[in-house]
Image (cartoon, rainbow, N blue to C red):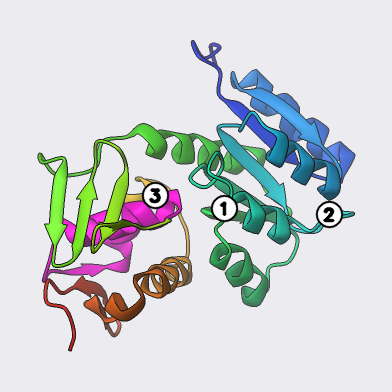
């Protein structure tokens, strides 16, 4: 692969040095600029100090500060609140994956993983950052929700919502098809991109996070059992 014209900076946080070296080598070969950190405490300090990377690859089990705590704090900082976070975890149990997604990770890969799979997920996440969202209008409004696609912002009653990249894409997809029931597979394709395989449970966790951030308006997103989700333009009583 030819080097990227404007190399994206990836922060790779992985305490298993052999895995970090192999993945770092392949990311560099793919044209990315890579910083590798093996310790959670040092990684959190780097995230806070900046400058912010374009994407973080984050192992959950780290010495010092855990990966989930790094992700949680990254989401509270303006510079890193919206950058993509890809989790790497040896824990395949659903509870661990849900915990990582709930605190703001955009995607995950479980160990042992294929380097090609990680590179594909990285590419997909970075393409989503600047990819145009479906629809010709840059302004979309549904009830108290207003999305400005030009600046990647959604407000609720004129107050900006703090959304991750994945949450933003999901909510926009629902807003662009009010009253329509969108199947989970359709949402995965719209948000993650074609050819990316994730479980429906991942979408469910992100939707739950969006509902929580909508507060009293969370019921605007209705679950259609066995199918997917529907956004109602009417504010529930």
Secondary element type, mark 3: helix
Q: Earlier in the sequence, mark 2 or mark 3?
A: 2
- The prevailing secondary structure element of the residues shown in magenta is helix
Q: Earlier in the sequence, mark 3 or mark 1?
A: 1
Q: Which mark is residue 192?
A: 3
Quadrant of image for the N terminus: top right
Measuring 32% from the left and 42% from the top, which residue is drawn there?
Answer: 152
- Of tags 2 and 3, the one toward the viewer is 2
Compared across the picture, whether 143 is left or right of 174 comes to left
10 Å neighbourhood of mark 3: few (<14), some, or many (≥20)? Answer: many
Instruction: Tell me residue 15's x, y (percent).
Output: 86, 46
Marks 2/3: CA distance?
27 Å
- Of tags 3 and 1, the one toward the viewer is 1
Secondary element type, mark 1: loop
Is-magenta flag for residue 100?
A: no
Compared across the picture, whether 11 is left or right of 140 comes to right
Query: Mark 1 sits on what residue?
Result: 75
Which stretch did the figure color magenta? 163-190
């Amino acid at each position: 692969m030819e080097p990227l014209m404007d190399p994206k900076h990836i922060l790779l946080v992985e305490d298993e040095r052999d895995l970090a070296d192999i993945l770092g080598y392949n990311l560099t070969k793919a044209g990315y600029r890579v910083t590798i950190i093996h310790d959670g405490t040092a990684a959190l300090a780097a995230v806070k100090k900046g400058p912010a990377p374009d994407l973080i690859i984050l192992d959950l089990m780290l010495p010092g500060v855990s990966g989930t705590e790094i992700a949680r704090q990254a989401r509270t900082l303006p510079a890193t609140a919206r950058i993509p976070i890809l989790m790497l975890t040896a824990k395949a149990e659903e509870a661990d994956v849900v915990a990582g997604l709930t605190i703001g990770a955009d995607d995950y890969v479980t160990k042992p993983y294929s380097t090609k799979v990680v590179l594909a997920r990285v590419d997909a996440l970075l393409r989503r950052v600047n990819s145009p969202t479906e629809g010709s209008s840059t302004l979309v409004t549904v009830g108290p929700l207003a999305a400005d696609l030009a600046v990647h912002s959604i407000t609720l009653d004129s107050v900006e919502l703090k959304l991750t990249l994945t949450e933003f894409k999901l909510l926009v997809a629902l807003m662009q098809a009010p009253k329509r029931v969108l199947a989970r597979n359709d949402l995965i394709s719209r948000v993650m991109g074609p050819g990316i395989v994730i479980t429906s449970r991942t979408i469910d966790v992100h939707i739950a996070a969006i509902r929580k951030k909508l507060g009293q308006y969370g019921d605007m997103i209705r679950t259609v059992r066995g199918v997917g989700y529907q956004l109602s333009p009417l504010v529930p009583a």
